[in-house]
Image (cartoon, rainbow, N blue to C red):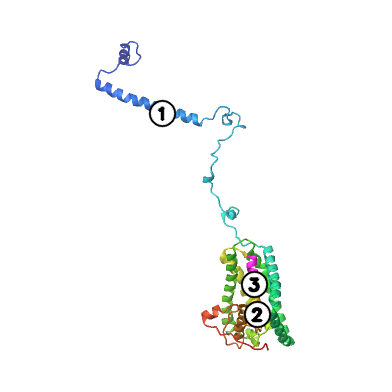
Amino acid sequence: MRRRSVRAATLPFSGAPAPSTNPLASNARSSTARPRTANRSSAWRGAFAASSATTPPAGSPLCSRNPETRQPPTRPSDTSSLTLTRPEHEATAPHGAPENPMTYDWIAALAYIATLVVLTIVGKKLVFSIPVMEEMRLENREVDKVKMSRESFRDGMKASENIGKYTNLGFFILVLPFAVGFDSRPLWQHLVEIFAILAIFDFMYYWTHRSLFHGDILRKVHALHHQARKPTWSDSLYVHPLETFIGLCLFLVSIPIVALISGGPLHAVSAAIATLIFTQLNTVNHTYTRLPKDNWFFRTVDYITGVHHAHHVDMNHGNYATLTMFYDKIFGTFEEPVKRETAA
């Protein structure tokens, strides 16, 4: 301490210590002193700039000493790119689980029934407005009068109709509201839903008809229906109640099956149109027809009735499907249509 003070005193007008007499040491000190000074000054300038940038201006609510008027710092307004969203049905579901889209929609079920009733009424009026179709209906009615004169025939029809009503009622209340809705969809999806319902039903009915009704299990039950060797319109309802229940359930269950496969309810109109096709084809294929061959519609109706009449010749013939002959042709049970000259 004494040496440093002595050296400093030998330098007039200077408060700094005396420089070293070693030239190498003085050069080293001069070369390292400047960068250190520059680094310190730049660091202070950066710190000052940072503090001034983050310090709110005077009078800002952030600087207020009153805690009631003090406001927290705001985040940048443009945070849309950082926001993560979830689908609406997932956001409202408990514990983050997706909601079940198949809910009980009784309004859609009523719309299904109303659509089916309206289409049936309008369709019959349009079809029987054709003179030749009305002529065929009257001819079937003449033969049906003879059959309906038998009490056993009337009782059989009534039993089949009753089981059909109760089965439909239970389905309309317990199952249908979960399987139909009103969600909008393109036309092609309506067509796919209709086709899927009919295709799945016809496949299940083909194997049920072939293995159960023409097998050993329910052959005697099915024999009641096969008493009609030359079927007419009323024979479509002359069916054992058990067979009516099984056949109707096979179709009705096809609607929720397609809904489950598609992941949501089917459109009420699509399901109603599929049901209309099912009910009318099962009536038409038992009807006696003898139509002109001058257009495709008459030829198609004659073909539909002819292939099912071939099935009714006895209980040893094929054509087990009820809507199309697609599965019969695939599995080798197809038989050519039968042409009948008279209804009786």
Q: Amino acid at mark 1?
A: Ala
Place residue 46 in its image quadrant. top left
Question: Residue 193: horizontal and vertical position, in percent?
Answer: 59, 68
Mark 2 to mark 1: distance in Å? Answer: 96 Å
Q: Residues within 10 Å of mark 2 (few under 14, many from 20)?
A: some
| Quadrant containing the C terminus in the rendered view | bottom right
Left or right: 157 in relation to 196: right
Q: Amino acid at mark 2?
A: Val
Residue at the spot of label 3: 275
User: For residue 313: magenta?
Assistant: no
Could you tell which of marks 3 and 1 lies nearer the N-terminus?
Answer: 1
Place residue 65 in its image quadrant. top right
Question: Residue 185: horizontal and vertical position, in percent?
Answer: 60, 62
Is residue 218 at all visible to an observer of this figure?
A: no
User: For residue 274: magenta?
Assistant: yes
Q: Is residue 222 above or below residue 47?
A: below
Disc 2 element: helix
Is residue 326 at all visible to an observer of this figure?
A: yes
Residue at the spot of label 2: 284
Q: Are marks 2 and 1 in contact (CB under 8 Å)?
A: no
Could you tell which of marks 2 and 1 lies nearer the N-terminus?
Answer: 1
Q: Give 15 or 304, whichever is nearer the viewer.
A: 304
Q: Which residues are magenta?
A: 267-277
Disc 1 element: helix
Q: Amino acid at mark 3?
A: Thr
| Quadrant containing the N terminus in the rendered view | top left
Residue at the spot of label 1: 43
Could you tell which of marks 3 and 2 lies nearer the N-terminus?
Answer: 3
For the point 69% across and 74% down, the residue is: 126
